């Protein structure tokens, strides 16, 4: 459906405001970067939290994302929306974090063994966002990452495979695994 | 077409990314398999729930902003 003229003008205005903010930040304007930060930090935090399955760990990584964004802003060419660039950067930072640290082994939310996952099953009604968030957080790492990127963030399997350095079929298999585990967790 | 393959391809099936022959295979399997129909119904409901999840998560902005 086509937007109303006023809505279209507002949308164009918002886009040009964002472009201006990004250009100012690229020129070194820290106030402009702080404005970008405030606009996007909630979404970046949600993405980190869901990929990592751990809210506190996510907060550390959010900080890292924005430090890297500040350092790499000069490379942003305005060929995509700034948000898309930032969220893709976020995915890369989270994946680097997961690869470069052993912290995941000491984290309580993740479990690689589906049998362990099953132990958390209860008979509570599944139809709430909180139940779903908890169930996603409890998925094994690879299944969780693919589920978040595909189902929540809307990336295609081809893109996810490229990000993870795996085959498209592996991404599909992990998504299927995630759904099966979620179904066992959420359905009475 | 197996149950596992059908369930794995459901996403592409629902979003129209399969070629006609693959689509027909899955349609035939869904008609014949109550387990996979149940799975497909659940997956459709899950997609609705996922779409309703908030895209933002609250965070202490000032604390992190100061650190940056």
Image (tube, rainbow, N blue to C red):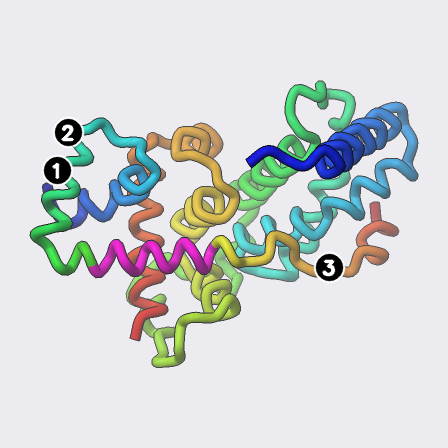
Which residue occupies the foreground of this view, A29 or B6? B6
- Quadrant in which the C terminus of chain A is drawn: bottom left
Please give left or right for residue A160 compared with residue B29 in the image. right
Residue at image coords 71%, 43%: A64
In terms of image quadrants, where is residue A28? top right
Give the mark, 3 or 2, whose residue is nearer the N terminus: 2
- Quadrant in which the N terminus of chain A is drawn: top right
- Callout 3 and callout 2 share a chain: yes
Give the labeled residue for mark 3. B59
Looking at the rendered image, the disc whose residue lies closer to the viewer, 3 or 2, is 2
Q: Chain of mark 2?
A: B
Q: Chain of mark 1?
A: B
Please give left or right for residue A79 compared with residue A101 in the image. right
Which stretch is magenta? B38-50
Question: Where is residue A165 shown, x and y percent of the image?
Answer: 42, 30
Residue at image coords 40%, 54%: B47
Measured in 3D between alpha carbons, the distance from the residue under mark 1 to the one under mark 3, in whole angstroms, is: 47 Å
Q: Is residue A86 magenta?
A: no
Mark 3: secondary structure: loop
> Which residue is outermost to the left?
B32
Give the labeled residue for mark 1. B25
């Amino acid at each position: 459906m086509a937007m109303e003229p006023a809505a279209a003008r507002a949308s164009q205005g918002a886009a040009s405001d964002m472009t201006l903010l990004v250009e100012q930040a690229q020129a070194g304007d820290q106030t402009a970067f702080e404005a970008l930060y405030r606009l996007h930090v909630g979404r970046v935090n949600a993405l980190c939290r869901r990929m990592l399955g751990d809210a506190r760990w996510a907060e550390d990584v959010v900080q890292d994302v924005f430090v890297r964004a500040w350092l790499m802003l000069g490379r942003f060419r305005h060929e995509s929306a700034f948000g898309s660039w930032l969220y893709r950067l976020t995915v890369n930072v989270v994946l680097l974090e997961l690869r470069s640290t052993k912290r995941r082994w000491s984290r309580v939310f993740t479990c690689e063994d589906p049998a362990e996952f099953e132990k958390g099953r209860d008979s509570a009604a599944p139809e709430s966002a909180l139940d779903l968030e908890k169930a996603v957080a409890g998925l094994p790492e690879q299944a969780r990452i693919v589920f978040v990127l595909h189902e929540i963030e809307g990336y295609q399997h081809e893109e996810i495979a490229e990000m993870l350095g795996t085959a498209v079929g592996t991404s599909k298999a992990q998504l299927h695994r995630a759904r099966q585990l979620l179904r066992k967790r959420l359905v009475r | 077409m197996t149950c596992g393959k059908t369930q794995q391809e459901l996403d592409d099936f629902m979003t129209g990314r399969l070629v006609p022959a693959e689509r027909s295979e899955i349609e035939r399997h869904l008609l014949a398999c109550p387990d996979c129909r149940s799975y497909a119904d659940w997956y459709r409901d899950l997609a609705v729930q996922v779409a309703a999840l908030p895209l933002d998560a609250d965070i202490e902005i000032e604390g992190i902003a100061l650190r940056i």
